[in-house]
Image (cartoon, rainbow, N blue to C red):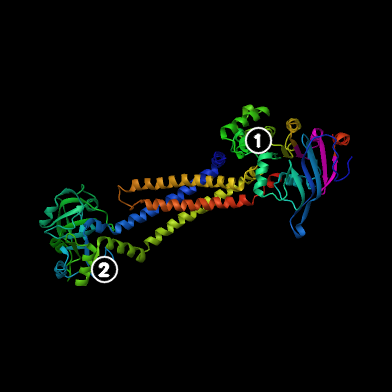
Amino acid sequence: MFHLALKMLMGDRAKYIMLVGGLTFAALLMTQQNAVFQGLLSWTTSHLRNMRASIWVVEAHVDYANETKPLRDTDVNRVRSVKGVDFAVPMYQGILKAKDSDGADKQIMLIGLHGATLFGRPPQMLAGSLQQLRLPNTVVIDELGVQRLTAKSKRTIRIGDTFEINDREARIVGICRTERHFFGYPYVFSSYDQALQYAPRQRKMLSVILAEPKPGAAISDVALAIQRETGLKAYTSEEFAKVTVEYIWKNTGIPMSFMTTIILGFIVGVAVSGQTFFSFVLENLRHLGALKAMGASTWTLSRMLLLQAFTVGTIGYGMGVGLAALFGFAVLPVGQPPFLLEAGSMIKTAVAIVIMCCFSALLGIRKVARLEPAIVFRG
Amino acid sequence: MSSSSSIPTDSTTSKTAVRVRDVTKTFGTGDGRTVALKGVDFETREGELHLVVGPSGCGKTTLLSVVAGTLDWDAGEIDVLGTRLNGMKKGAVTAFRGRHIGFIFQQFNLIPTLTCVENVSVPLLLNGVHRRQAESTAAELLQRVGLGDKGRKHPTELSGGQQQRVAIARALSHEPRLIICDEPTSALDRDTGHHIMDLLSTAARAPGRCVIIVTHDPRTYGYADRITEMEDGRVRQVLDGDALRHYVAQHA
């Protein structure tokens, strides 16, 4: 009987297309919005992945990775003196104004790396030499920086070109690849000392201390020891990522905004699939009554309805997730909007679609269970 | 002519296929309460083509529904093909219907998205016959009702008479012993109606089988072996033999 159930479903083209379309739209909306949200969340912690330090020591009131509250220069030595610390280096981070060769202002995320070690260096150099950061007025910029700092009227900037940071010359000595920062500014790397010259003068200039534990020492134990002995906040990279994501959840409207869209997608899916499937059942009620009269049990008819609901659900899910993946393929090379499609997101969409299918099928099953087969004898 | 509610004594040796004793059925409650069957007695024998006639609202279709087990009744006894329907669970009644009863409906009730072969194969599939075997049997039956070349067509591509012939093939596909028809000719023209009645008459002659037809159509009376006339929820008269011939001549 089940092949006939599928033929009954697909034979009603308009309803079939409506059902598949509604579920595709719902699956697409839920998956795509979830992927963009996950992508955006991953941007909030990209800073940590770009620097790749085991321990991040920050001012005691810093709540998340993209917040800067300066430390005293002497704090670096206090951290170095903690037992279990292999080494600790200062790092500057700040949002500064740069000027391209047309004179247009652009915001950049300036990172000042410890000159001797260049610890926290960008994950991948595409061109040039990181070592040249030790020369005066030199910077390494990321690919986004190449895009943003290229003047509209000129050719694409490259190694050897210059621009200005806070009215001081910055000469490009390398191009690197980074994960995009949450704030959307390009990364510009310089030495720590150079960064202090670019940045506006403040009483305290040190943003973060990056530290590594001695071989064999547990990272979390060392972080706790730093915290205990210095009164500063010391996070392992994983902890810092976790508190950063928590901060975004608690203190911004971003999750609520995405959740609203995802919930709307779910509601639209439930409404469209439920309503369309129920009207499909109502239109076929006479035929279902005839089948019941001819000996089809409620259980057989229920399984037929479940098969029909889950068939459109599977097709809609496949098409929706497929379209979301295509969206990802289209936007990932551009880098905007953020997109991170994980198995978890797809499983959540699948669960939502299963709920929609069950709801739709149950509406029909309820009707069929109450259906008197004698309905077929009423003209 | 037999008197109201009486069952004629049959001198032949054919077995009783359907026996209904003092059946009552009420719809609704309070002011909307309607008594559709008021202590109805009804009997059909194997090999018979039995018509149930009467004005609209007299209880013909309700009687057909309770005999088919598609509608519960309030009181009385119903035996169909030697099985007492009283007290049977719904699932068992459904299974019984699926095995032993074929249906032909006024509006055909063919599923428009299925081909004729698939429509005819439905009762076989419900009885657990393999799809390939069911479709092969269905194609043979369509051949028998003169629609051998229409198997792959959809019902909407056929005329009313052709659709009813598909419905007859469907009703016969699982070789039921009882065929129940609700106004099978009312939507058809004269010639087609006669063709359909010829097919049903032939079907009724199969060993161990009987056909019960609810109808308003006097053109069908000549095919009957027995006619039960109903009025206001009761059996007014049961006709066979000379009385039946006289009745048919009157309504011709």
Secondary structure of the residue carrying tag 1 is loop
Magenta stretch in the rendered image? B211-238
Label at residue A62: 2
Secondary structure of the residue carrying tag 2 is loop
Question: Is residue B88 positioned above or below B225 on the image?
Answer: below
* Badge 1 amino acid: His
For the N terminus of chain B, the image quarter is top right
Q: Chain of mark 1?
A: B
Q: Residue at x 76, y 57 (%)?
A: B32
Foreground mark, 1 or 2, reads: 1
Q: Residue at x 16, y 58 (%)?
A: A119
* Badge 2 amino acid: Val
Between B96 and A196, which is closer to the camera in this rendering? Answer: B96
Residue A37 image point, x, y percent: 36, 56
Q: Share a chain, discs 1 and 2?
A: no
Quick check: B170 left or right of A203? right
Residue A282 image point, x, y percent: 61, 48
Whether residue A217 is visible, yes or no, is yes
Residue positioned most to the left = A135
Give the quadrant of residue A72. bottom left
Question: Is residue A86 positioned above or below A14 on the image?
Answer: below
Q: Chain of mark 2?
A: A
For the C terminus of chain B, the image quarter is top right
Q: Is residue B232 magenta?
A: yes
Q: Assess disc 2: are there few (<14), some (14-19) or many (≥20) residues with their C-alpha within 10 Å of its C-alpha.
A: some
Quick check: A133 left or right of B187? left
Q: Which residue is mark 1?
A: B174
Residue B212 image point, x, y percent: 76, 39
Between B100 and A336, which is closer to the camera in this rendering? Answer: B100
Q: Residue at x 32, y 62 (%)?
A: A245
* Disc 1 + disc 2, Cβ < 8 Å: no
